[in-house]
Image (cartoon, rainbow, N blue to C red):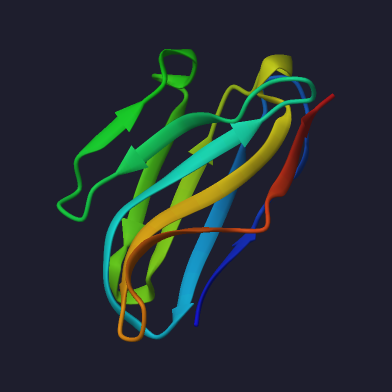
Amino acid sequence: QVQLVESGGGLAQPGGSLRLSCAASGSIFRIYAMGWFRQAPGKQRELVASITSGGSTNYVDAVKGRFLISRDAAKNTVYLQMNSLKPEDTAVYYCNANILSTSVGTRDYWGQGTQVTHY
């Protein structure tokens, strides 16, 4: 079994910052790409940022220059530092990871989601 557990969501004031964390645990052999998606009410889930096992990053245009994705391989954790938050950043944020498990091979896993609200 592999689990992704997210933390760090909440309320943010205009122009404020939040940091999301997502820790993977369980029967993990290797973690490949990790990323953050978000889904606002009435909209489709979209990729916000991703990071490969080698550290290469990719961002959706709407967050470039404001968000920073990083990962700590030793902790099996991916972070999303969100700065200069805007109303349009309000959404449920989901962690995603492509993981080779010792029991079921390679597949994508999702976190439970964490709410980020700009007020």
- From the viewer's side, name the closer residue of 43 and 56: 43
Question: How far across and down, in percent of the image, does residue 71 sit?
Answer: 34, 56
Residue at point 60% right, 34% down?
Answer: 38
- From the viewer's side, name the closer residue of 57 and 32: 32
Residue at point 74% right, 16% down?
Answer: 87
The residue lying furthest to the right in this view is 119
Residue at point 53% right, 51% down?
Answer: 95
- From the viewer's side, name the closer residue of 90 and 68: 90
Residue at point 63% right, 24% down?
Answer: 44
Picture layout, residue 76 above or below residue 107: below
Question: Is 81 on the left-hand or right-hand side of 87?
Answer: left
Q: How many marks?
A: 0
Question: How far across and down, in percent of the image, does residue 33 sit?
Answer: 29, 51
Q: Quadrant of residue 75?
A: bottom left
Picture layout, residue 7 above or below residue 70: below
Q: Quadrant of residue 97?
A: bottom left
Picture layout, residue 84 above or below residue 31: above
The residue lying furthest to the left in this view is 54
- From the viewer's side, name the closer residue of 37 and 72: 37
Query: From the image, which quarter does the C terminus lie in?
Result: top right
Question: How far across and down, in percent of the image, does residue 59 sit?
Answer: 37, 26
Q: Quadrant of residue 18?
A: top right
